[in-house]
Each structure stands twice: as C-alpha cells, then as structure tokens.
Image: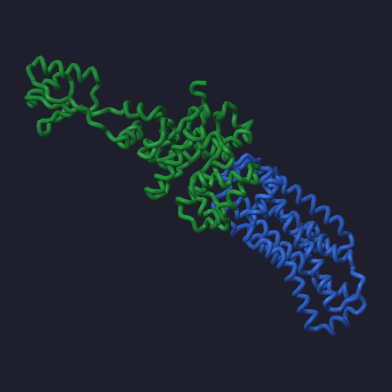
Amino acid sequence: MVNEMIIQTVQLTKKYRGRPAVDQLNLEIAKGDIYGFLGPNGAGKTTTIRMLLGLIQPTSGSISIFGRELKRNKLHILRRIGSLVESPSYYGHLSATENLEAIRRILDVPKSRIDEVLDIVSLTKEARRPVKGFSLGMKQRLGIAASLLGNPELLILDEPTNGLDPSGIHEIRELIKRMPEQYGITVLVSSHLLGEMEQMAHKVGIIREGRMIFQDTIDHLRLQAAHDIQLVVSEPDAAIWIARDLGQTGTLQEGIMTFPGMKDAQIAHLVKRLVENGHAIYRVEQTKKSLEDIFMQVIGEGA
Amino acid sequence: MMLRSLRSDLLKIRRKGLWFLVVAAPLGLVAMQGLNFGLRYDYLSDRYKEDLWGGLISNINPFIPMALFLGCTLVSSLAANIEHQMSSWKQLLALPISRSAVFLAKLLLCVLLLTVSCVLLPFFTAGLGFLLGFQSPLPLSDLLGMGFYPYLAAWPLLALQLWLSVTFRNQALPVSLGVGAAVISPFMGNLSEWLPLNWPMLALVEASRLIFIISGVVLGIVLALLSLAHFNRKDVD
C-alpha cells in the first residue's frame, strides 16, 4: 500500500504536425498527494491534462489511472475523477444550482450532493443567481464544486488560480489543501507559479517544452539548487587567495567573501585550510535562494 | 446513458428561446395565411370553393421546406452553441459519459424540438381553418402530411447542420450555409430530383413521395453516423 500510484504515464507523447507538445513524459502521482504540475506557459501542461482526461488522443505512450489503462477503461476511470480544465466552463444563463444539476443528471448522484458541494466552496448564498453575473473567482469555485459533484478520488485542476486576485487565490488554495486531509482525494494541480505550489503541493513535476525536467518533493527541489556560501573571516584579503589556490573563485565585498555553488566537502576543506593559516573564522553562512530563483534555474537549464 | 444526457440538455436550453422558436415558427406560417385569407377572404373562398381546406393547405405548403431548413439550422446551431459559448465541451466530455451518448442526445434534442414544430403546424392550420369557418370533415391525411413528409425528407440537412455546428466553434459558417440553403431552396426545383435540397418539396407535392421520404431518412441517418464517427475521435480543445 505504500506509494500506490494513482496516475502513471509512460513515455507519453503528443505531436502537433510533427512538433512534440508533450515529449516522452513519465508522470507519477501517488495516492493522497497534492501534486504540483509546473511549467511556463505553453510547456505542455494543459495538453498533458487533456490527455489524462481523454479529451485528446496521445500520439504515443500510455496512461494508466487507478492502475488501469485509460484507453480501455475510460468511463470507469472518469467516473472517479473530477476535473477543471483551464478557463471555467459554465452555462451563463443558468443559476449555479442549475449548472450543477445539468452535470448531476449525467453523473446520476443524489440531488443532495448539489447543496453539499455548494457548501464546500461557500457558494450556497449565490446559488440562485445566473452564473454570468459571477466574478471570476466565484466561477472558478463553481468549477471546483462541479468537479467534486461525483465524489471523485482524484481531482485534476488545470490552472485553477489563473487570473484570480490574491484573495481568490488564497481561497482556492485553502480549498485544495483540504482535499486530501478531509476527503482523501488525490490532487493534480497545474500552475506556472512555483510560489503558489510551495504553499500546497507535496510533490512537484516541472516540465519545459514538453519534457519533464524535475519530479520530486519540494524539499528535494530546494536541496537540488546550488547555494551561495558566504564567509566572514579576520583577514579576507589574504583568505580569498587561499580559496583561489583551492580552486574556489569567490568575490569579496565589504569584508564578506561569497562563493557560488560549493559542495559540503569543499566548504570543509576551505575552512580547514583557513584555520591552518591562522585566520579567525567568524561566520560561515548559506544564502537562501528563493524557490522562484530555483524554478528559474531549473527551467533555464539546458536552454 | 443517452437519456441522461438528453435530460441534461433539456435543462440547458431553458431560457434560451428554443421553445419559443419551436412554437413561433409554425404559428408564423399559419398567421401569414390567416392574413392572406383574412384580407381577401371572398376572392380565395370563391377560388377554392370546391375544396376550402385544400386551398388553405396548398397556400401554406410552399413555405414549409424553407421554414424547415431555417429551423434545422437554428435549432442545431443553438443546441451546439450552448456548449461552445463558455467552452463547456471539455467539461462535458470529461464526465463519465460516452461521446456517442453526448452526440446522439444533441441529435435527439434537435429531432424532438423540430417534431414539436411539425406537430403544431397541422394543429394551427386546423385552428385557422375553423376560425375561417371551414366545415368538417378535416382533411386529416393532408394535415399530417404537411407536418411530417417534408420534415422527414429534411433529415439530411439536419444531420449536416448539426455536424457543422458541433464541429466549428464559430457559428457563422454553419448558420450562413443553412440560411443560404433555405434562401435558394425555392429556386432549385428545376434541378435534379437527386438533389436532397429538393426532397422536402417533392415529399410534399409528388404522388411518388414515399421514395423521397425514405431517402431523406436513410441519408439523414447515414450522415448522422458519419458525424458521430468524427465526433468520437476528434480532439477537444
């Protein structure tokens, strides 16, 4: 039961006129995860999600969800998935309740479920108004309500916070965070903003130009990034030359030496040599890079 | 599964004016003749004194095929546009329902709406006849014929329009084509009997109407199945 895979794709590829939009993607999402699917606009996130929902056909590769192949068990699998793809889909002339009823008639779940999901996204008060008068945040929440209607085990949300104001983003984020805890739902959520993912996702997959370039926990992503090391010593002018002898090119500014991307062993070696040479070491610090910097670094690699 | 989708569609067309259109179209056709007969009742009742009902029906008939073409165009465009408008196809097709069920429910919805129009037409016509003081017996077979023969013969256009409306997000193309077909249809009568555009009129006036009705239904079903096959495999954006 450890790490039961909910979604697994193998070499998933989609080509448009010979150009790959998604290229040999191996996606792995475990049960109970909130998986953040990240990448710049046009990286292939939406294309991947549409393939996961059977909206478009992969050119090659396979998708299995809940341990079954999507192609052969599409309706069974879709029965257990709730989704929200990109811009909100709704019927503007109908009220929120009627919108959900239109979907409920297809899902064939009890009518009481409509009030339940409206309550989850706090739209109960607005339920009778035509949806065309809703704010974008409310429409997006209605979309999430619709995705929850069928009691899904997996929620696939494509850019659910796109275009929302900060309070709207906050609401949606809190909503998503509750899903695994309260309802045992696994969540795949895509975004082009890492900062947003940092606050809700356990695991992230980063894609760029259709290829997966990083897939692991957020903590691993932090570790993977090269950090700067800052040293403050008694005689920095001499110390920087000792470092250079060891092959570490640093910069000296206001008595602080800064070395980019040093490994643990190299730091230890440098400190040892400085002590041997009679320097007093006041501070050895690691400067924290923001996740956004790390994201840019990961995305930039191989460009 | 298709019925569930149809029930969902029936909810979605609320307040979209489709039901109004469905009632207004036959009412309009009959009202036009109400005006015609009302303004020159003496002349027309003298001209058709042998067969007053036949006279009324024969005055309505020429307009039926054109009205049907317009009806097919508008009903299928409105039915498809409900999903196009706020890009609901992706939401609808990610639900656990087969694409066939979704498409056939749309087709059934159009058939249902147009059938209501075609049932109402004979009723309104009979109503006008009585209003004008025509006597019983009612020409039942002629009345039913005006309602259903041309309608069944128009199925190919209905299937084509639905396919175009569902396929193209921009409804300008299907609507222009459909309205264009409706407008030129009265002038196509001299052309071949093989032209499906002529079948509704031929089904209305020809003694050998059965062949046109059957051809219409068969070609309509064939086109609908082809559209279905396309819908089943197309990528949804």
| Vertical position of residue A59 compared to residue A130: above or below | above
- Percent across and percent down for residue B48 are 88, 78
Q: Is residue A166 above or below residue A249?
A: below
Location of residue A97 in the rendering, given as x and y in whole percent from the top left corner? 58, 52
Left or right: residue A6 versus residue A173 is: right
| Chain ID, blue in image | B
Q: In the rendered view, does A134 fall on the left or right side of A288?
A: right
Question: In this view of the protein, can residue A44 be seen by the observer?
Answer: no
Report whether B232 appears left or right of A60: right
Examine the rendering and report whether any part of residue B96 can be seen: yes
Q: Position of residue A27 (x, y in %)?
A: 48, 29
Q: Is residue A78 left or right of residue A156?
A: right
Question: Is A34 located above or below residue B60 in the figure?
Answer: above
Quarter of the view holding residue B199: bottom right
Q: Residue at x 61, y 46 (%)?
A: A103
- Location of the N terminus of chain B by quadrant is top right
**Residue B85 lies in what quarter of the image?**
bottom right
Q: Quadrant of the C terminus of chain B?
A: top right
Q: What residue is rendered at 52% in x and 46% in y?
A: A119
How far across and how far down the image is residue B43, in percent?
84, 84
* Of A187 and A20, the residue lying toward us: A187
**Chain A colour?**
green
| Residue lying furthest top | A276
Q: Extreme bottom residue here?
A: B42
Task: Identify the image quadrant of residue A148.
Answer: top right
